[in-house]
Image (cartoon, coloured by chain):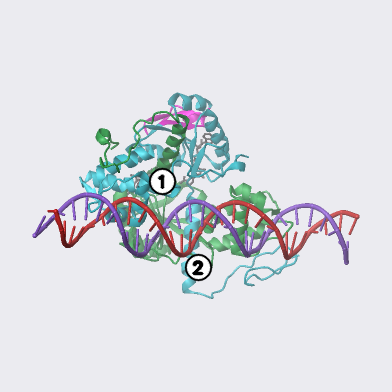
Chain colours: A green, B cyan, C red, D purple
Amino acid sequence: MATGRTHRPATRSRGIPEATVARLPLYLRALTALSERSVPTVSSEELATAAGVNSAKLRKDFSYLGSYGTRGVGYDVEYLVYQISRELGLTQDWPVAIVGIGNLGAALANYGGFASRGFRVAALIDADPAMAGTPVAGIPVQHTDDLDRIISENGVSIGVITTPPGAAQQVCDRLVAAGVTSILNFAPTVLSVPEGVDVRKVDLSIELQILAFHEQRKAGEDATAEDEGAPPMRATPTGRKGPDGDMPAVMPA
Amino acid sequence: MATGRTHRPATRSRGIPEATVARLPLYLRALTALSERSVPTVSSEELATAAGVNSAKLRKDFSYLGSYGTRGVGYDVEYLVYQISRELGLTQDWPVAIVGIGNLGAALANYGGFASRGFRVAALIDADPAMAGTPVAGIPVQHTDDLDRIISENGVSIGVITTPPGAAQQVCDRLVAAGVTSILNFAPTVLSVPEGVDVRKVDLSIELQILAFHEQRKAGEDATAEDEGAPPMRATPTGRKGPDGDMPAVMPA
DNA sequence: CAATCTTTGTGCACGCGTTCACAAAGGCAT
DNA sequence: ATGCCTTTGTGAACGCGTGCACAAAGATTG
Ligand SMILES: NC(=O)c1ccc[n+]([C@@H]2O[C@H](COP(=O)([O-])OP(=O)(O)OC[C@H]3O[C@@H](n4cnc5c(N)ncnc54)[C@H](O)[C@@H]3O)[C@@H](O)[C@H]2O)c1
Ligand SMILES: NC(=O)c1ccc[n+]([C@@H]2O[C@H](COP(=O)([O-])OP(=O)(O)OC[C@H]3O[C@@H](n4cnc5c(N)ncnc54)[C@H](O)[C@@H]3O)[C@@H](O)[C@H]2O)c1
């Protein structure tokens, strides 16, 4: 499997930590808003609040980019917008292909938030022959058979997968073979990719489950000292696992 | 603002680290697949591969839940499915409300992946009067005016926000006031919520920007020492910063 | 029942990320 | 200039998460 050497020497790039990279878009969004209001400068404190982070963290993040700030004053908004944009590679245009034009794929295609940054929906691809030619968001859907050609002709290096889970890996393989080196996956599947290809996933179901966990915990705290159904009662005793019949029976499919 | 005391005592719950909680849904998904194939047991190695993680990490994660495994054999699939489901709070039903039934909201409403776990779309809410009553995915859209009533009547504690960014904070405030304590936000905005309310965000644009960063880095490694294009504008007088002097101290009037 | 083999559970070390706290830098008023 | 005030940039401490490596536990076989 591909994860064998998933070890990216990490931020061997030029120092910028991954966690910082993940926050740069957040700063950029806040700065863009300030820019539109013609605000000339911001302090780390103000910007941090706007971005929803700690001010010390923000300053440290910026320190990785360089010394762009004026002590006693703050940061020049326009200048910082440019620096972050450049660092993120947004000064150039990124053609993106979306594969799987169903409910979600169509919604993404219709989303205007792409172009606002340097992203452009260059192609929509689906396996359903009936969809071929049909325009979605003004862009005609093309058939999977031409995937390879479409990717190379448009110079697409970023692909978005919104197919059913079962088709995701296959689509992924084809995208990679065609030259795509970054994938945003919405299908609830673990994708295997060769080294050098980045994959990020968006999984709605996982997010909800994490919320449910905390929700349950919150509910449980109120009823503290309250009987908690069946205390997990560990296994160690010797009686081992399965505290008797607590096990099976009810199981959410 | 509510972020003042955003510090969460973190995993004060009862040990389970946040990182582990975030992976439990991943394990659960892999286990469910095994269960459907009637596989009785799995080793940490096999399951880890299926979930796309390190086997040591998986074992450590499970160790927080208890000692559910048999040395020399592995883990009982059914039993583990049950334990994780219970830990995540999926043995109960979670009514969810989606606010903002546009492109994305409608796609989510139509998504079947909800019900497969313990989540149920209990209500669809939109501010557009023209949509009121119109069924989406078989569920009639209700008007924002009744938000408070809808939330309490259905006992909704998890809300999903898919409105335009400008309306997100307002919608969030109303949801919280109505009793919602967990929010999944798709709008590109930083939400302020009182303590005790959890917020998770899904931001497509941020994911793409992170991919773009790495993409640019990959491209840059090939053609190192290539021209850096566009001249920035320095605003601060004393032009002299810039990390490695790569920044021409251009000083427009 | 003893030997052997497999796999778990975890102690330990390490590295990343976060936060604190403060000296230094710069603006500004006098 | 000089002194004061604001805010940056960062050294250092700390805590969390990760991965290694191995002893212990249990299954299995003879
Ligand atoms: N809709 C949501 O809100 C949502 C939320 C979370 C996750 N997801 C995931 O996103 C994916 C898409 O969801 P959806 O609701 O849009 O599904 P959908 O069924 O509406 O759309 C899937 C599309 O993919 C196409 N397709 C199937 N196989 C293909 C292939 N091999 N190559 C190219 N195209 C192919 C189909 O023709 C269809 O148009 C699924 O994996 C789903 O689990 C969806
Ligand atoms: N569509 C996507 O693929 C996508 C991707 C990433 C992020 N987003 C974000 O998700 C959100 C929704 O995107 P969309 O494409 O579905 O937009 P949309 O315009 O299609 O839908 C927005 C819906 O929200 C409703 N609405 C507006 N104000 C409201 C209010 N105060 N209360 C209740 N409902 C209200 C509108 O009537 C409309 O139906 C946006 O914030 C967008 O930035 C969308």
Q: Does the magenta stretch include residue B132?
A: yes
Question: Does residue B68 appear in the picture of this structure?
Answer: yes
Q: Which residue is tagged 2? A: A13
- Residue B52 in percent (x, y) is at 34, 55
- Badge 1: how crowded within 10 Å, few (<14), some, or many (20+)? many
Extent of the magenta region: B122-144
- Badge 2: how crowded within 10 Å, few (<14), some, or many (20+)? few
Q: Kindly report the distance in space between the C-alpha atoms of the residues bearing marks 1 and 2.
A: 30 Å
Q: Does the magenta stretch include residue B48?
A: no
Horizontal side, residue B202 vs residue B72: left or right: right
For image coordinates 63% across by 57% down, the residue present is A59
Q: Which residue is tagged 1? A: B21
Identify which amino acid the numbered label 2 is placed on.
Ser
Label disc, if present, on residue A82 of the rendered structure: none
Identify which amino acid the numbered label 1 is placed on.
Val
- Residue B119 in percent (x, y) is at 37, 35
Q: Which chain carries label 1?
A: B
Horizontal side, residue A116 vs residue B79: left or right: right
> Are both tags, 1 and 2, on one chain?
no
Label tally: 2
Q: Mark 2 lies on which chain?
A: A
Q: In this view, does D7 lie above or below B158?
A: below
Q: Is mark 1 on a helix, strand or loop?
A: helix
For image coordinates 69% across by 70% down, the residue present is B249
Identify which residue, B136 or A35, lies in the foreground. A35
Identify which residue, D25 or C19, lies in the foreground. D25
Horizontal side, residue D25 vs residue B223: left or right: left
